[in-house]
Image (tube, helix red, strand yellow):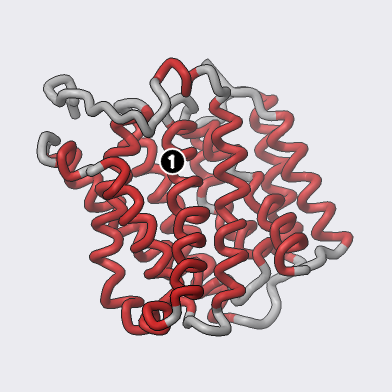
């Protein structure tokens, strides 16, 4: 895969590479980790008016419109090679189905979905671990996820089915996201924008029917747009800026924070109070991330 023949796109809306590089990549990840569940937490509040698949489509569509207006990614897409175009199309399909699965899964508490979502990426982290310190970090994170998952697996079998489907798709998101991030922050965001347009088209038959009530109520539509920006624009852009500078194994292990941030957002927004066992699991996850040391 080569991008040497592709002219760089300029946009005043995106910080220059030097400015972005002055921000630690872990900071971008932390912003992503917070918004990864903050947007869905607000989306849950919309479920009383719009079915989950309708909210999922509105999230994807509003993010796609933002990327289209901001980055105009079709200009960049036209100059890409066949392999890069395939990666973008694959990522778009994954984003569409992953978001739909996620919203069908969050009939479960956010902390539970976050724990299950991490089970796949933890395999990516294991594949990149090469030191005893990092193996110990991984063991702590696994123990924490096990505690979080074990104390919650009861009832809602359909919710768990969608949660594990979301987990598998999240692994593909990380792999494909790193692939498109390889050219750097700005080109990666342009590719992400193109993938989001693909996701919007793929998700039309999944959720457009359920989304119709929002088009009859400006308040609902604005709320759905807010969910899209906070769920799919801010975290995915931050992911690209982090992935461009973090190894995939390091990024995957940092994803262990997701159960913790999911539980915290669940407490603050949805009043989903964790049990003492769940707090223990969250603590083990955070300890594992703190122990981890990035390699090379």
Label 1 secondary element: helix
Q: Is residue 55 left or right of residue 153?
A: left
Question: Which quadrant of the figure has residue 62?
Answer: bottom left
Height in image: 174 above or below 199? above
Residue 72 in view here: yes
Residue in the picture at 33% in, 83% down: 209
The percent position of residue 178, horizontal first and vertical second, equals: 38, 36
The percent position of residue 149, horizontal first and vertical second, equals: 69, 63
Residue 126 in view here: no
Residue in the picture at 64% in, 57% down: 115
Judging depth in this view, the residue of 2 and 232 nearest the camera is 232
Give the residue number, with chain letter if any, for mark 1: 237
Q: Is residue 152 left or right of residue 38?
A: right
Q: Is residue 92 left or right of residue 32?
A: left
The percent position of residue 257, horizontal first and vertical second, equals: 66, 45
Residue in the picture at 40% in, 20% down: 17
Height in image: 107 above or below 122? below
The percent position of residue 230, horizontal first and vertical second, equals: 52, 54
Q: Where, quadrant-wise, is the N terminus in this rendering?
A: top left
């Amino acid at each position: 895969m080569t991008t040497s023949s592709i002219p760089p796109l300029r946009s005043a809306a995106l910080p220059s590479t030097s400015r972005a590089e002055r921000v630690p990549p872990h900071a971008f990840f932390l912003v992503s980790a917070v918004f990864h569940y903050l947007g869905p937490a607000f989306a849950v509040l919309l479920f009383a008016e719009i079915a989950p698949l309708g909210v999922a489509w509105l999230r994807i569509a509003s993010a796609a419109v933002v990327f289209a207006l901001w980055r105009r990614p079709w200009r960049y897409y036209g100059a890409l090679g066949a392999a890069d175009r395939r990666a973008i199309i694959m990522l778009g399909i994954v984003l569409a189905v992953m978001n739909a699965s996620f919203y069908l899964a969050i009939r479960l508490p956010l902390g539970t979905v976050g724990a299950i979502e991490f089970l796949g990426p933890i395999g990516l982290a294991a594949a990149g671990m090469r030191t005893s310190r990092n193996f110990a970090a991984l063991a702590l994170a696994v123990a924490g996820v096990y505690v979080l998952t074990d104390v919650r697996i009861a009832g809602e079998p359909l919710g768990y089915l969608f949660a594990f489907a979301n987990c598998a798709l999240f692994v593909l998101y990380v792999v494909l996201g790193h692939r498109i991030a390889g050219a750097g922050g700005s080109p990666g965001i342009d590719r992400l924008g193109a993938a989001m347009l693909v996701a919007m088209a793929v998700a039309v038959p999944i959720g457009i029917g359920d989304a119709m009530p929002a088009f009859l109520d400006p308040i609902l539509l604005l709320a759905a747009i807010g969910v899209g920006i906070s769920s799919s624009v801010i975290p995915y852009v931050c992911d690209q800026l982090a992935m461009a500078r973090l190894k995939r194994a390091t990024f995957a292990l940092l994803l262990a924070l997701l159960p913790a941030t999911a539980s915290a957002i669940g407490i603050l927004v949805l009043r989903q109070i964790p049990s003492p066992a769940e707090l223990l699991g969250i603590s083990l996850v955070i300890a594992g991330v703190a122990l981890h040391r990035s390699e090379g």
